[in-house]
Amino acid sequence: MRPSPAPLLSVQGVTLRYRTKDHLITATYRVSFDVYRSDRFVIVGPSGCGKSTLLKAVGGYLPTVEGQIRLNNQEIARPGPDRVMVFQEFDQLLPWKTVKENVVFALTASGRLERKAAEEKAMHYIDKVNLSGFADSLPHTLSGGMKQRVAIARGMAMEPEILLMDEPFAALDALTRAKMQEELLQLWEDTRFTVLFVTHSIPEAVRIGSRILLLSPHPGQVRAELNSDGIDARGPDGKLLTQRIEELLFQENATQGRMAHV
Ligand SMILES: Nc1ncnc2c1ncn2[C@@H]1O[C@H](COP(=O)(O)OP(=O)(O)OP(=O)(O)O)[C@@H](O)[C@H]1O
């Protein structure tokens, strides 16, 4: 038997808290999961269960209270270019820079590439998100979906070890959202990047994920981790998986922290 590969990202027993003036808020409690290279790892759970907080901690913006987060076996202590975030908001781009310049700037400002190499790489990824014809446009002339495509192109151009996506399509209309999900999967087919994707939409989790982690309501604990690789989200298996997730998330007396593998 071949030894199983080491995880790219390992989250072990992670508790995350916010301290406000009057309260200590536990956002996640002893959450554990592993993300392997080329996983499309989706975290799904109800509003307030700590999904964004987990992503912030993986991004290196929030320290753990308990547990450890390791990338390539190195403990995460601060943000770094090996982890790039894409957010829900459409205002992630620099409004005074064109589409191309937004991507080029991310590559040159981090000192990773010279101007010419950065331009080439920027155009490569802008093309991948089908925006070549808009390279010289300013963000305010683009639709919400197009802005998100630019943010994704910028994130991918940085070629991080892992792309962190926090509800990137939640503010889009249903049709555009479905199209963007399709495009993301196509991009993944092309480049097999590793993505950690947060959503509160079960259909989106089933559509995007190769693995799906379910978190309980606040404070978020692991309720189950499901294998969804190769499942046709629109076919009978996709429907069954959606039902199973609904049961696991909404059953009244779910045993907290119990792991279910499908
Ligand atoms: N900056 C903050 N200060 C204090 N509490 C916070 C802060 N950010 C989040 N919280 C609290 O932490 C908990 C988890 O929030 P988080 O935003 O991570 O949840 P979520 O699952 O991403 O929710 P949603 O799906 O609504 O975005 C919530 O109770 C929230 O109120």
Image (tube, rainbow, N blue to C red):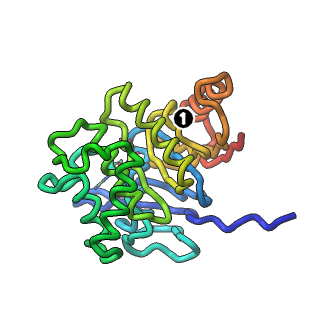
Q: Local crowd at mark 1 within 10 Å, few (<14), some, or many (≥20)?
A: many
* Residue 26 appears in the picture as rendered: no
- Residue 235 drawn above or below residue 121: above
- Residue 127 drawn above or below residue 205: below
Residue 203 x %, y %: 51, 30
Question: Dot 1: what SS?
Answer: helix
Q: Quadrant of residue 209?
A: top right
Residue marked by disc 1: 207
Q: Quadrant of residue 12?
A: bottom right
Q: Is 56 left, or right, of 224 in this rendering? A: left
Residue reaching furthest to the left: 96
Tell me the residue at 35%/66% (across/down).
61
Residue 55 x %, y %: 42, 56
Quadrant assignment for the C terminus:
top right
Mark 1 residue type: Arg
Residue 158 x %, y %: 39, 64
* Residue 148 appears in the picture as rendered: yes
Residue 152 x %, y %: 37, 50
- Residue 154 drawn above or below residue 189: below
Q: Is 166 left, or right, of 20 in this rendering? A: right
Q: Quadrant of residue 94?
A: bottom left
Tell me the residue at 87%/64% (across/down).
1
Label 1 CB less than 8 angstroms from ligand 1: no
Q: Is 50 left, or right, of 149 in this rendering? A: right
Q: Nearer the viewer, residue 88 or 147?
A: 147
Q: Nearer the viewer, residue 193 or 245?
A: 193
Tell me the residue at 25%/56% (across/down).
100
Number of dots carrying numbers: 1
